Each structure stands twice: as structure tokens, then as C-alpha cells.
Amino acid sequence: MDVVMIGAGYVGLTTGACLAELGHCVVCVDTDSMKVARLNRAEVPIYEPGLSELIRRHMMAGRLAFTHDLASAAPQADAIFIAVGTPSGDDGDIDLSYVKGAAAELAPLVKPGAVIVIKSTVVAGTARMIADLVAEIRGDSDVHVASNPEFLREGSAIGDFLEADRIVIGADDAHSADVLAELYAPLRKKGVPFVTTTTTNAELVKYAANAFLALKIGFINEVADLCEAADGDVAAVAEGIGLDRRIGRAFLDAGPGFGGSCFPKDTRAFAATGRRYRQPQALVETLIQRNEARKTKLAAKIIAQLGGKGGRVAVLGTAFKSNTDDVRDSAALTVIPALLDAGIAVVAHDPKARKATERLVPGALWRDCPYEAAKDADALVILTEWADYARLDLGRISGLMAGRSIVDCRNLFAPHEVTRHGLKYVSIGRRPATPTPRQKEKHPGAGAGNWTDIAAAPA
Ligand code: NAD
């Protein structure tokens, strides 16, 4: 099939490359001509494991191309996906202007029978509203607009597409359903389950799924706080509940609060939809509030522990999670500015997200390796679970730091691994671990520095 993908961001690029992998001819269209020029040189502007190779392979095979000229690409297409951004608006609802803009530009260009597929995450009723918009512009009510929400996770997006848990197709007419079924036929043959339903249901599935996953994270974060107070260990509790097949282990890792391009924005939009329909989503409203408060509280605790005397903090990891350079709504965007405002020098490291972070939160010093960042730091804070951080040589870190405390918001280490190097270890959902008297003897600096018990600090 001939496919056009409008929007060459995380979703558009991954979906476009994966549809080429399924054997379709795909043209990705983006209004950002710099991005298009880079893509045409096979330079992939985002970091996503395996994506560059996939894109290069299909460009060489003639199945994948990039342009900023929708008018040249759209008329041949059997399916045109809209995968543009849907940022949060002021009231938490989403800004549909990019989706509407793309649909309006597209409306006069599509051939009869072509299906416009909304891939962007949009609120209930959007596909029907876009169908009306396209019909009005074309002066013809025979239009096909479908919904095909995306569930990929950045960092494992290609696997999530090719080995999807399910494909949700929202179609209000049989032709749209047939075209999408044919497009995804290779995945259906591999046994990927299909859910074919109305466009409104498909739109609701996406938000309800993300709200539910975000609630799991929010829940385990609250359990983690209880574990700290009750001398428990959240990892053991998560394992104990996660092995229950009705619950599942995924999304039960306590941390600094969820971020990224989806959960914060999608929970806000879900809550806004509830308010609009006068069916308030109280659980999700509370979740949003608690999640934001968690990041602010973390920053406040770090500042309080440095005693208002300034100091130097090494921040390892600014991406919202590992294996991505995406920093949208990451904990680092709250923590770094708060530390800087408090007069604390921040020395940051992230293997992929430096550029994106510098654009959003200037003022931190950057180092090319975590050891350089740790040098002379009064405290070291781990915000992202990069695998390299879990392999850090803690003896070397201990020797480089001026202070003794490691605040690990991702629980990358067993407490005794850290304390045996004379460091104090503050993690999430576990009591802070301090070096034993023997360890202190071996490392005379242990317990020195201006750090006290972060978990016991006032909120
Ligand atoms: P993004 O910001 O990375 O990319 C959007 C792209 O669309 C940009 O390159 C922009 O230049 C382009 N664009 C905007 N208007 C255009 C137009 N009229 N014509 C052509 N190009 C245009 O966004 P993203 O992260 O890929 O997200 C896209 C949508 O998918 C959003 O609704 C998002 O919520 C949803 N989604 C994202 C993820 C994710 O993990 N990133 C996962 C599932 C769903």
C-alpha cells in the first residue's frame, strides 16, 4: 500500500519505518524542513534504539522517503496517517490545532477511498470532528477518517510496533476498517490481537490505558513513601504484588514521579475530558497533583539537606527514562531549576539528553562522563535509570566526591554495595543506609559532608 505519514517525530518516524518493514511504501511529511533535510541524509534526529538502521535500510530499498511537500505525496496515498503533536493546552485539555491544520491541508488532496488515520493521541470525538471538517472542505461527505492510537514506549518503540500487545482500530465505516486491516495484515498473521471498534472507543482506549499505567506508577510511589516510614522495601513489595497475574509487575518501579511526552499530558487530557463531560476522574485528578508534588518535594528535600549554603550537586540522568533523549516533563526539569534557584551548582550528565535538556533548562554545567560530573560534588543524584549508571564504579565515585551522599531515585543499587564504599545511600522506598562503624573506619570520610537523612527531611 502507499502510505503517507504526516509528522516525522517519535511516533511518525517509528510508525513510518515499521510500516515500510511490513512492506508498504511510506512517505513521511514534516513541516520542519531542517528535519526533512537531515532525514534525507539518513540522519535520524531522535535517539531510538534500532531506528536509524531501520530507516537507512528502507530508504535504500526505496520504501521510505521524506518530504515537506504534502501536495506531492498525498494524492497517491491509500492511507494518510496524522501523527503530529497534541500538546497540553492551558486547562489540561489538548491543543488540537496541529491535527486540525494537517487535516485541513490534506482534505483537498486525498483521492476518493483514501483513509485518513489519526495516530496522534486525541480526545474522544476528535476523529468524527475531523471527518466533518474534511467533508466540509471537500464539499463531499464521502470521507473516511479512522483512529489508530499508538501505544509505543520510547526506548523500545520498534519492538512495541512489530510485537504489539494489540492493535486498536477505530473505524466508523466498513471501508476504513478493511483498509487498516489490510495495512496491518502481516502483524495479524503473526498473531497480534486486533480490537476493531468505533473511533470514539479507540480514542478512549488510548487515554484509559495510559491513565491506568500512570496510576500504577503513582500507586507504587505512594507505597514507597509508606515503606520508607514503616521500614519496608518497596522493591520486595512490588515483586510480591506484581507476581499476581491480575496485577502484573510492569510499571511498579518506584521513582521520582512519571514524566515523558505521554503520561503527564495524557492524564491531564483524560481529567479534562472527565470535567467536560461532567464525569470527573477523581483518581486521575489526584494522581496528577501527587505526581507533580513528588518532583517538587524531591527538589526541596535536596535543597534542605544542603543547608541553604549552596554547594554542588551532580545530577546523573535528565531524560524522563533510559534509552531515550526525550526530556519532556522529566523530573530533571523540576529538580535542576530548583537547585539552581537555591544557589546550588548543578553538574549534569546524560548519555543522550544533554542537548534537549540544555534547551529547556539552561544554567547547569555539563560533563561527558558521570565520573567527571561526580568530581567534587557534595551530593550525587541519580534521576534516570540508564544501564551505565547501574554499572558505576562506586569506589571511584566515592574517591571523587567531596560529600558522601548518593540519592538514587531509581534504586539502581543494593544499599550495602554503596555503603561499603563509605557512602551514605538514600534510595526510594527504603530507609537510607549509612556506613557501618567498620565501614567508617575503613573510609574515614564516611558520613562527612553536609548531608543528613533525606527521607526524614520535612516535606
Ligand atoms: P513530536 O513532537 O516528536 O513530532 C511531531 C512532528 O509533527 C514534528 O516533527 C512536527 O514538526 C510535525 N508537524 C506538526 N504539524 C505538522 C503538519 N501540519 N504537517 C507535517 N508535520 C507536522 O511528537 P510525537 O512524540 O511523535 O507525538 C505525536 C503524537 O503521538 C502525539 O499526539 C503524542 O501524544 C502521541 N504519542 C506519542 C508517543 C511517544 O512516546 N512519543 C507514544 C504514543 C502516542
Image (cartoon, grey):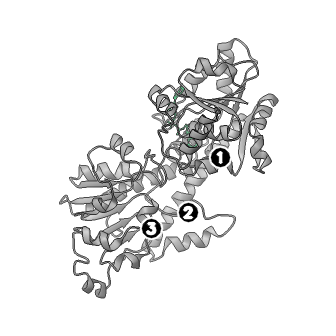
Which amino acid, by three-letter code, is at mark 3?
Asn
Instruction: Name the residue that disc number 3 marks.
Output: 411
Which amino acid, by three-letter code, is at mark 2?
Leu
Q: Residues within 10 Å of mark 3 (few under 14, many from 20)?
A: many
Could you say which is closer to the camera, residue 187 or residue 58?
58
Is any atom of residue 275 visible in this view?
A: no
Q: Residue furthest left?
A: 309
Q: Position of residue 69 (x, y in %)?
A: 55, 20
Which quadrant is home to the N terminus? Answer: top right
Instruction: Name the residue that disc number 2 marks.
Output: 252
Mark 2 within 8 Å of ligand 1, using the beta carbon: no
**Separation (CA) of disc 3 from disc 2:** 12 Å
Mark 1 within 8 Å of ligand 1, using the beta carbon: no
Q: Quadrant of residue 381?
A: bottom left
Between label 1 and label 3, give the one nearer the viewer: 1
Q: Would residue 315 appear left or right of 429 to someone viewing this image? A: left
Q: Would residue 318 appear left or right of 176 to someone viewing this image? A: left
- 438 w.r.t. 163: above or below: below
